[in-house]
């Protein structure tokens, strides 16, 4: 299809098909790494709106808390195959503040879930979550809130099992 679109001079279609092919390649690599769960953006937004504690979705580069080694290891493996363009962290932010916080307020920001992002897709790929002494936001809690069907998998179970 890409070659046919190139010959026809359909530049925008060529770009869209190439992007789709790249997404499929990246998802195949995620399956090989065992990173098969994902959530659609609209489900995270639904969870965000319903959550009474207040949530924040921050770029990993701006996230100011330590990330456990097991989650960092999963991120590095995804980085090694170039699966994601960027990462975000879903975490509680009870004050819903976008301004500077005191050190005590910063301490209360824990409980994250790390998601990988692909440019052009409205999907958050689950990389890892963790529980600490202050809070326990996990992918399972997100599923309980917005429904188990919201957590999808890149791997479809075989009907022959």
Image (cartoon, grey):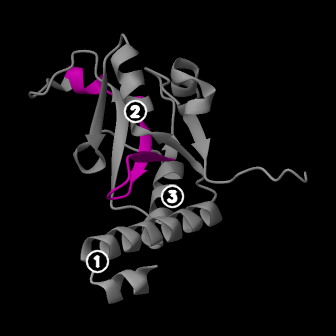
Q: CA distance from mark 2 to mark 1?
A: 31 Å
Residue drawn at x 31%, y 17% is: 54
117 relative position to 80: left or right: left
* 14, 68: nearer the viewer: 14
Q: Which residue is mark 2?
A: 42
Q: Position of residue 16 (x, y in %)?
A: 34, 67
Look at the numbered discs 1 and 3 and tell me whether their residues touch, using CB distance below 8 Å. no
Q: Residues within 10 Å of mark 1 (few under 14, many from 20)?
A: few
Q: Which residue is mark 3?
A: 73
127 relative position to 102: left or right: right
User: Which of the two discs, 1 and 3, sits closer to the camera?
Assistant: 1
What is the magenta range? Answer: 104-126
Q: Which residue is mark 1?
A: 10
Q: Is residue 111 above or below residue 123?
A: above
Q: Position of residue 143 (x, y in %)?
A: 56, 26
Residue furthest right as drawn: 161
User: Which of the two discs, 2 and 1, sits closer to the camera?
Assistant: 1
Q: CA distance from mark 3 to mark 2?
A: 28 Å
Residue drawn at x 28%, y 16% is: 94
Q: Is residue 150 above or below residue 116?
A: above
């Amino acid at each position: 299809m890409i070659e046919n679109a190139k010959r026809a001079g359909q530049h925008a279609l060529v770009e869209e098909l190439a992007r789709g092919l790249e997404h499929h390649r990246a998802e195949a690599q995620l399956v090989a790494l065992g990173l098969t769960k994902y959530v659609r953006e609209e489900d995270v937004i639904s969870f965000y709106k319903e959550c009474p504690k207040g949530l924040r979705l921050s770029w990993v580069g701006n996230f100011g808390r330590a990330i456990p080694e097991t989650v960092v290891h999963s991120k590095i493996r995804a980085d090694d195959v170039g699966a994601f363009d960027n990462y975000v962290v879903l975490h509680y932010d009870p004050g819903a503040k976008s301004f500077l916080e005191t050190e005590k307020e910063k301490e209360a920001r824990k409980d994250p879930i790390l998601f990988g992002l692909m440019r052009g897709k409205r999907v958050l790929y689950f990389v890892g979550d963790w529980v600490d002494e202050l809070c326990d936001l996990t992918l399972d809690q997100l599923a309980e809130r917005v429904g188990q069907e919201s957590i999808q998998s890149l791997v479809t179970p075989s009907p022959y099992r």
